[in-house]
Image (spheres, rainbow, N blue to C red):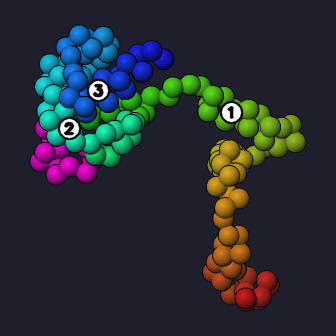
Amino acid sequence: MSTAAKREKVLLDSAKGLVSDADLSTLQLSRIDIASLGLQLRMLGGLTKEQAFHSVKELAQFVSALHPQTRGLFSELEKLIHLCLCLPVSTACSERSFSALRRLKTWLRSTVTQRRLTHMALLHVHKDILDDLDLQVHIDDFISRTPERKSTFGVR
């Protein structure tokens, strides 16, 4: 957890122009060239002095909006941003998913196929998104796809 926090702090500090080589040496990065990263972080500080970034996501959006040739200069920086954004900070989300699977796949549903179980788990975990859906639109779309459905369920 502290390593992830250090990485985020280095990224956000570099956007303000506050980069030190001592901070870079403590990041524990195996596939990133530290010397190139230090140079790229200093260049980033020159680009973003007038802007204030409060999260790595905001910084990632800024870097992704750069011209492709300019963005090519920040390859090691992009690797570090990807690492910060993809690294799970806690295991709560994955534990929640396994708890949902345990509730879904009971002895009564032990013959459910993997595809259907995956879809049911996604629906269960992301039920907040489902609550916002307009089901009538999806029902009408389903019915209108074949003539048999139209004759069985009627057309609205």
Looking at the picture, tell me which residue is in the foreground, 17 or 24: 17
Distance from disc 2 to disc 3, alpha carbons, whole Å, reads 11 Å
Looking at the picture, tell me which residue is in the foreground, 125 or 9: 9
As shown in the figure, which amino acid type bears the numbered disc 3?
Asp
Q: Is residue 7 magenta?
A: no
What is the crowding at mark 1: few (fewer than 14 residues within 10 Å), some, or many (at least 20)?
Answer: few
Above or below: residue 24 compared with residue 80 = above
As shown in the figure, which amino acid type bears the numbered disc 1?
Arg
Looking at the picture, tell me which residue is in the foreground, 6 or 152: 6
On the image, the x and y values in percent for residue 24 come to: 25, 16
**Residue where numbered disc 1 is placed:** 96
Q: Can residue 76 be seen at all in this image of the molecule?
A: no
As shown in the figure, which amino acid type bears the numbered disc 2?
Lys
Magenta region, residue range: 63-74
Above or below: residue 137 compared with residue 88 = below
Q: Earlier in the sequence, mark 2 or mark 3?
A: 3
Instruction: Name which residue lies at 30% across and 10% down.
Output: 26
Q: Which mark is residue 60?
A: none
**Which mark lies nearer to you, 1 or 3?**
3
Q: Quadrant of the C terminus?
A: bottom right
**Residue where numbered disc 2 is placed:** 49
Q: Earlier in the sequence, mark 1 or mark 3?
A: 3
Question: In the shown orientation, is residue 147 left or right of residue 61?
Answer: right
Q: Is residue 64 magenta?
A: yes
Question: In the shown orientation, is residue 81 left or right of residue 152?
Answer: left
Q: Can residue 150 be seen at all in this image of the molecule?
A: yes
Q: Would you identify the image quadrant in which residue 5 lies?
A: top left
On the image, the x and y values in percent for residue 18 come to: 23, 24
Q: Secondary structure at mark 2?
A: loop
